[in-house]
Amino acid sequence: MKRSELKTKTVAELKAEARSLGLVGYSKLRRDALVDLLVGSTVPPRKRKPARGGKAPDRTRAAAGKSRKAETKATSKRAKPLARGKRATARGKVRVRKAGATAAEKVLSPRTRRAFSLRRTNGAQQRITAAKYYIGVEETPELDESFVFPQGYGEDFISLMIRDPYWLYAYWELTEERGRELRDILTEDEFATSRLVLRVYDLTGTDMSAPNEHYDIDVSPESRNWYVNVLRVERDYSVDIGVIAPDGSFILVARSSRVSLPPIGPSPVIDEEWVTVDALGHIYRQAEAPPDSESSWWGHGGGKK
């Protein structure tokens, strides 16, 4: 149908014509947009060649129906993008509701619907990524709510640890039995005026039989740990905990192990040579070999003869 004929019709007639052609998205279009839509969807009939007699055959009812069917098929192909939810442009943008949209999303703007679509897509991708690292719910053992860690374990000890090149850390436990023993050694007045101290020994190059030097740190009887700031760095230390009586004598309660402070700054060793796999195999073979009577400590009287 020509544009001039369509312009003479009303909007209702134009919509009826669009409905008869199987078009969609025309309900909110104005007159000019409807005319453009109908003109673009109209397919002119194909011209048939005349017969040899020079006279074109008359169209039968079946031929007319077939032509009408082909025209409708061509029209539906042109309107296919609209049926898929695409935006068709006829002067204004035609919005078509998507088949998968919910009732709440149908009344939203295109930007809001696009945001909902991205959210669904991103959420699904996040769930897929999280499923790759999901190892199931770990069963936690039943905890005894009434359990309380004890204040001590009934042993007299002191442990010494390294914090950094300048500081040591000591923690200890003194039992009541040891306190009663000290009261038996000292009188009640002497025990009350005694001092609980940490005696720090410098054992660099020697042992406890002849320490280089030592100094005392007074601690509270209620204390259970202490930070020790050393006098000299890069040395070996050990700590005793004990009581200094009023006469100046030292009664030992517990002794720690020996520790070596690390050097200050980066290590000066830069020519390290790493052990190879072949060298390790040689060491293992030597360790598995039977002891030699001339080279092992077993042949020098270290064991039974």
Image (cartoon, rainbow, N blue to C red):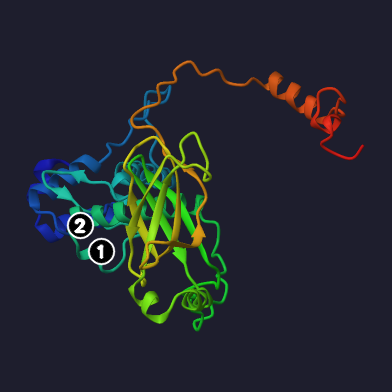
How far apart, in angstroms, are the residues tagged by discs 2 and 1? 8 Å
Tell me if residue 100 comes above or below residue 284 in the rendering: below
Which residue is drawn at the image coordinates 22% and 54% (left, top)? Answer: 25
Q: Amino acid at mark 1?
A: Glu
Location of the N terminus by quadrant is top left
Residue drawn at the location 51% of the way across and 73% of the way down: 178
> Which one is nearer the viewer's eye here, 124 or 204?
204
Work out which quarter of the rendered image holds the C terminus and state it. Answer: top right
Q: Quadrant of residue 141?
A: bottom right
**x, y (%) of residue 239?**
44, 52
Which residue corresponds to the image point at 69% horizontal and 20% vertical from the top-left? Answer: 279
Q: Which residue is mark 2?
A: 112
Q: Are circles 2 and 1 on residues that touch, CB within 8 Å? A: yes
Which secondary structure, mark 1?
helix
- In this rendering, position of residue 279 left or right of residue 158: right
Query: Can the viewer see residue 12?
Result: yes
Residues 212 and 87: in front is 212
The amino acid type found where label 2 is placed reads Thr
- In the rendering, at what x and y percent does residue 266 appear? 36, 27
Q: Report which residue position mark 1 lands on.
A: 105
| Front position in the image: 184 or 92 | 184
> Which of the labelled discs sits on residue 245, or is there none?
none
